[in-house]
Image (cartoon, grey):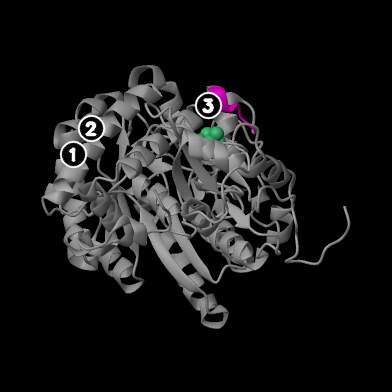
Amino acid sequence: MKFQPPGTFRPQAGNGYRLLPFRFGRLPGRADEVLITGDSGRFVFLPETDFLAFAQHRLDPDTSLAMDLEGLDLLHRGGGPIPLERHVVAWRTRKAFLFDGPSLHIFVVTLRCHHSCRYCQVSRQAESDAGYDMDAATASAAVDRLFESPARQLTVEFQGGEPLLAFARIRGIVEDIVARNRSRRRAITFVLASTLHGITGEQLAFFREHRFELSTSLDGPAALHNLNRPLPTRDSHARTMTGIAAARAALGADHVNALTTLTRASLAHPEAIVDHYIEQGFTSIFLRPLSPYGFARRGLARMGYTTGEFMAFYRRALTHLIRRNLEGHVLAEAYATLLLSSILTPFAHGYMDLRSPTGAGLGVLLYDYDGAVYPSDEARMLAAEGDTRFRLGPVQTPYRDLMLSEPMQTLLAAGLTESLAGCADCVFQPYCGADPIDAHARQADVYGHRPTSAFCARQTAMFELLFGHLREGDPDVMRVFQSWVQRRRVAEIRDESPETTHAAA
Ligand code: SF4
C-alpha cells in the first residue's frame, strides 16, 4: 500500500460511500432488527433490510438514512478524504485514561479483620494475628512509587482486612503523602474501605481533615447483612449503621458510600435490598456479584449462583429501582450507570475493571502489607491463595521497572478487547473491557474463552438488558437512565429527548 499522509486514508468506495469500522448484532426477541455500533461508541438500530442495503453499499447516499449513518461515524459519503481528525478526537476521548498512567493506588495496611465473612475475597487474618501489618519502610517505598506514577490526579485507597486496625499506619502514610505533595502538587483523593465498626472520634477528625471518602459494605436489611457478615455478637448490621451515622455526622453524607455483595441468600430479596438503601439515605447502590477469589472461591458451591440466576435478580432490582426513582427517590445502580455512561456519552469512565486496554497495572497499582506490588486487588487475592504470577515485584522496584515487568507484558498482550477473539467482533466491544486476571482466575487462561466465560455471559446479559430498554425508549425509563448518567434528579430530566444523547436509536 502506498504511503498516504494522515487525514487522507481512502478505503475502497462502494455506491457513493465508504463503510467505516462497525460491529453488529441482534438482541434477543428482535430477530428482524440489527444493532450497529461504531468505534466512537455511537449506535443505531436498523431494520434487517436497511442494514443489508447499508453493508452491501446499496444505500442511496443522498437519503436521510445515509446522512444519519454518516453522523454516527458509520459511513463516509462521497470520494473526499475521510475526516480522520474527527475519529481521532473520538478515540482520544474514550481512551483518555491512557494518558494518565496508574491513578488508583491501593495500600493494604493490614490483613487483620474482626469479621469472618462467608464471601471474603482477601483471605483475611484474625484480629490478634501478628505479622500481617505493613511496616514503615514498606509504606515509605510505596509512597515513592505513588509519586513516580505520572497521573496528575491520584486516588489513594486504604484497604485490609480491616484498615482501621492499622490506623497509625494510615495516619503515617497520609502525613507522608501530604508533606511530599507540597512540592509535587498532585490532586489527591483519599479513600478508606472499612466496616466502620468501632470508628473513633479521633479517626473521624483525621478523615475529615483530609477529606476522605469512606466506603463500607451494606448487604441489605439486618437479617441478610448479619447472615453474610457474621460476628460472634451477631450485630454486624447495627455496628455498620452506627459507623455510617458517625461518619455522616463528621464528614457529610456525600462522603460515605456503601457496596453490596450478593450471595445466594441475597437473590430472593432484590426489592428489600433496594428499599433498605433508600431508607438509609444512600443515592447509589452497586449490586455486585461474588468474585471467584479468596474465601469466596471455597464457598461458591454454598453461596454461588449462575449468571442466569444473577440476571433474574438484577432484572427485578432494576425494575424496582426505576419505579422508585420515578416516585421521586434518588438511587442509581452503579454498574448500570457505568455502562450507560459508556453507551450514551463520548467519555471514558473511571472504572478499572471495564477498560481496554485493561485497567490492571495501567490504571491501578496495589501495595500489599508485605511489600509486594500487584496490578490489581484481584491479583493480590490470587497471590494470597499461592498463585503469584501477577506479582510485579517488591515495592522497592522503581515504577518504570514495575511497568516493564514480565506480568505487565502478559497483561498488555491479553488486555485489549479490540484484539481478543470473540470480543474483537462483538457488537458491545466499544463499551466493554478486558480483565485478563479475572479470565485467569475463572478459566486458567489470561486470554479467556468468551463462549464459556461467566464474565462475558454477564456482560452480554447486562448490555442486552440495557440496549433493550434503549430500543424500547420508554420516556420514563429514559429519564431515569439520564438522571443516573447526569447525576441529576429525574424531575430535572423531564424535557430531554433521547436525540440529545450521544447515540441515535
Ligand atoms: S467480554 Fe463478551 S460482551 Fe464484552 S466485548 Fe468481549 S465478547 Fe463482548
Looking at the image, which residue is at 25% across and 39% down? 318
Q: Is there a contact, CB below 8 Å, between mark 1 and mark 3? A: no
Q: Is there a contact, CB below 8 Å, between mark 3 and mark 2? A: no
Amino acid type at mark 2: Arg
Looking at the image, which residue is at 47% across and 48% down? 43
Residue found at the far right of this picture: 2
Ligand 1 closer than 8 Å to label 3 CB: yes
Front-most of residues 445 and 48:
48
Indicate which disc residue 320 carries.
1
Query: In the shown orientation, is residue 432 left or right of residue 115?
Result: right
Residue found at the far top of this picture: 301
SS assignment for the magenta stretch, majority? loop
Give residue 146's position: percent from left, percent from top: 58, 64
Give residue 40's position: percent from left, percent from top: 55, 55
Q: Secondary structure at mark 1?
A: helix
Residue at image mark 2: 316
Residue at image mark 3: 453
Give residue 124's position: percent from left, percent from top: 42, 37
Front-most of residues 351 and 440:
351
* Count of numbered circles in the view: 3
